[in-house]
Amino acid sequence: MLHLTSDHAAVILDHAQQAYPDECCGLLIGITTPDGQRSLLEVIPTRNAWDWEAAEQMANAQPSLGIDRQQDKRSRRYWIDPQDLLQAQRYARTLTHRDGTPNLIGIYHSHPDHPARPSECDRLCAWPDYSYIIVSVHHGVPQDLLCWKLDPHHQFLSEPIVIQPTGGDRS
Ligand SMILES: [Zn+2]
């Protein structure tokens, strides 16, 4: 279960809309409580760094995906610069929270004109324990915001999300 606020959702949906027809991507900082519940603290939009070099790396790491270096554009793929990841990790360590240790808990990205379901590429590249938010964008308008998490067999399961209206007790 992932808890987020309507402000968090708005940041993700806005980013998805602005990036269209490309995929957007970003990082999720939050806490995991001992009972496995997650609360999102901050959304960090990042640049979609998919380029020829990223395609090359992906093609070598996951040959079964059949990455097409010419055809696979940022409208179909995303890539988070490792530097952005590192920076977000460092930033998370500067935060404190009464219910847990803030850390990177997941990644969000958008699917322009595709359902908010993980692709095979998403599955193969996913990390265990991360929450993956996917937003579908239809003709430039964000539609569904869904969350996914790997099971022990490296298959995605839907992770329920709870969106709290902003303005209540958010401390
Ligand atoms: Zn995807």
Image (cartoon, rainbow, N blue to C red):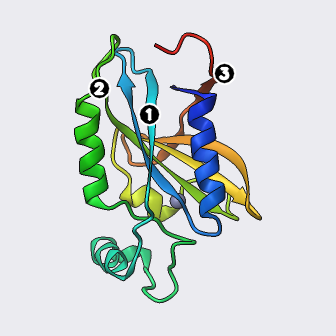
Neighbourhood count class around disc 1 (C-alpha, 10 Å): few under 14, some 14–19, many 20 upward: some
Residue 145 picture location, percent across and down:
64, 43
Q: Are marks 3 and 1 in contact (CB under 8 Å)?
A: no
Q: Secondary structure at mark 1?
A: strand
Residue drawn at 38 percent across, 45 percent down: 153
Of mark 1 and mark 2, the one earlier in the sequence is 1
Asked if 110 appears above or below 50 in the picture, the reply is above
Q: Are marks 1 and 2 in contact (CB under 8 Å)?
A: yes
The quarter of the picture where residue 137 lies is bottom right
Asked if 112 appears above or below 163 in the picture, the reply is below
Of mark 3 and mark 1, the one earlier in the sequence is 1
Instruction: Please tell me how many numbered marks the rendered image carries.
Output: 3
Q: Is mark 3 within 8 Å of ligand 1?
A: no
Q: Secondary structure at mark 2?
A: loop
Neighbourhood count class around disc 3 (C-alpha, 10 Å): few under 14, some 14–19, many 20 upward: few
Q: CA distance from mark 2 to mark 3?
A: 23 Å
Q: Which residue is mark 2?
A: 95
Q: Are marks 2 and 3 in contact (CB under 8 Å)?
A: no
Q: Amino acid at mark 2?
A: Leu
Q: Is mark 2 within 8 Å of ligand 1?
A: no
Residue drawn at 23 percent across, 31 percent down: 93
Q: Is residue 116 visible?
A: no
Q: CA distance from mark 1 to mark 2?
A: 10 Å
The quarter of the picture where residue 105 lies is top left
Of mark 2 and mark 3, the one earlier in the sequence is 2
Q: Amino acid at mark 3?
A: Pro
Q: Which residue is mark 3?
A: 165
Q: Which numbered tag is attached to residue 133?
A: none
Asked if 97 appears above or below 127 in the picture, the reply is above
Q: CA distance from mark 3 to mark 1?
A: 15 Å
Q: Which numbered tag is attached to residue 42?
A: 1
